[in-house]
Image (spheres, rainbow, N blue to C red):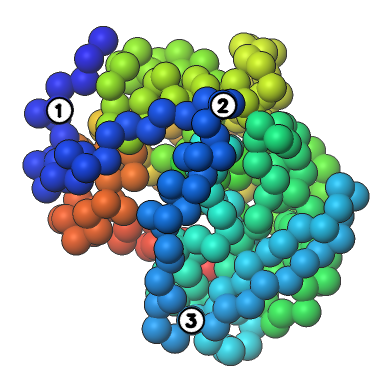
Amino acid sequence: MILDYKQIDPALLAPLDDFPPLEINRDNVDEVRAMVAMMEQPPNPGGLLETKTTICTADGDLDIYIYRGSERENQPALVWIHGGGYVLGTADDNRAMQIAVELDCTVFSVDYRLAPEYPFPAGPEDCYAALSWLMSRQSGYDVDLTRVALGGHSAGGGMAAGVILMNRDRDNFPLSLQLLIYPMIDNLHATVSGTYENHPVWNRAVSDNAWDMYLDGRPGTDASPYAAAFRAEDLQGLPPAYICVGTADLFRDENIAYASRLFEAGVPTELAVFPGLYHGGESFVPDAPVSERFTRSFMTALRDAFA
């Protein structure tokens, strides 16, 4: 099926002329990483205090970027997982910086290992190690451990959903919110929106390739729910969730279905669906009205969770 671009918000169309959908596979992943890194030089928002620390895990050293809006005592905290289809991206992440400044909180952004060099479960294990380090009071930062959220965007949101399940089944650290910004959670994309071939930025073909690299093959319905949260059979006992997605996003229907299953499992869940928004569109045109509503929505959810 072909997505009609008339369904996209007109304010978001212009960047698509200069940014065709990514093409990524095992042979060109290094080239795409270099290209994306050149495009994503993150600015340092005014008033941001940042540093980097390295922790020792069972799998080796792990870098964590730490962003703070101020030196205010007893801040709430967010463990942040960057996006990039499980194969791209860096913890030096602009959205993590924005959250720290706007909400005056401490954001711990995890520089997890990427596929295909390090397929599942490397990334989630790194993120869980970072969560455990923070919740075990090893960070040295003055944060309020009763107000900790875990989240991410795109693949980072998908990995966050998996780590949330992992946490429930292991230490069950108390978390205020799982912040899932258009999360990549279904390795099969077995939905109506998953049948479209031409989504902007992140389409079905590139997503299938990314899943193949992350899962080191495509195990289908046998994939671990810690890798593809959509595969989870039991969603009970999870922390409150906020999920947002656009109507022109490949992940639209899997996100809506996952939210519905969270409702049914008794998990307090907010779902926000934004008309005409494609994957990452709010980053390309941040001052578009739909982009501003999108950002304001997830910031409000996180602020309320920290209250």
Q: CA distance from mark 2 to mark 3?
A: 38 Å
Tell me what residue is drawn at x 25 percent, y 58 percent. 286
Name the residue type under label 2.
Asp
Q: CA distance from mark 3 to mark 1?
A: 38 Å
Asked if residue 175 can be seen in this view, the reply is no
Q: CA distance from mark 1 to mark 2?
A: 30 Å
Count of labels in the image: 3
Q: Nearer the viewer, mark 2 or mark 3?
A: 2
- Which residue was labeled with disc 3? 48
N-term mark: 2 or 3: 2
Q: Nearer the viewer, mark 1 or mark 2?
A: 2
Quarter of image, res 87 = top right
Name the residue type under label 3.
Leu
Q: Position of residue 266 (x, y in %)?
A: 56, 36
Asked if residue 112 is positioned above or below residue 4 in the image, the reply reads below
SS at badge 3: loop
Q: Position of residue 241 (x, y in %)?
A: 51, 46
How crowded is the residue under tag 2: few (<14 C-alpha within 10 Å), some, or many (20+)?
A: few
View extreme (right): residue: 58
Tell me what residue is drawn at x 58 percent, y 78 percent. 50
- Which residue was labeled with disc 1? 5
Asked if residue 41 can be seen in this view, the reply is yes
Name the residue type under label 1.
Tyr
- Which residue was labeled with disc 2? 27
Tell me what residue is drawn at x 70 percent, y 45 percent. 113
Image quadrant containing the N terminus:
top left
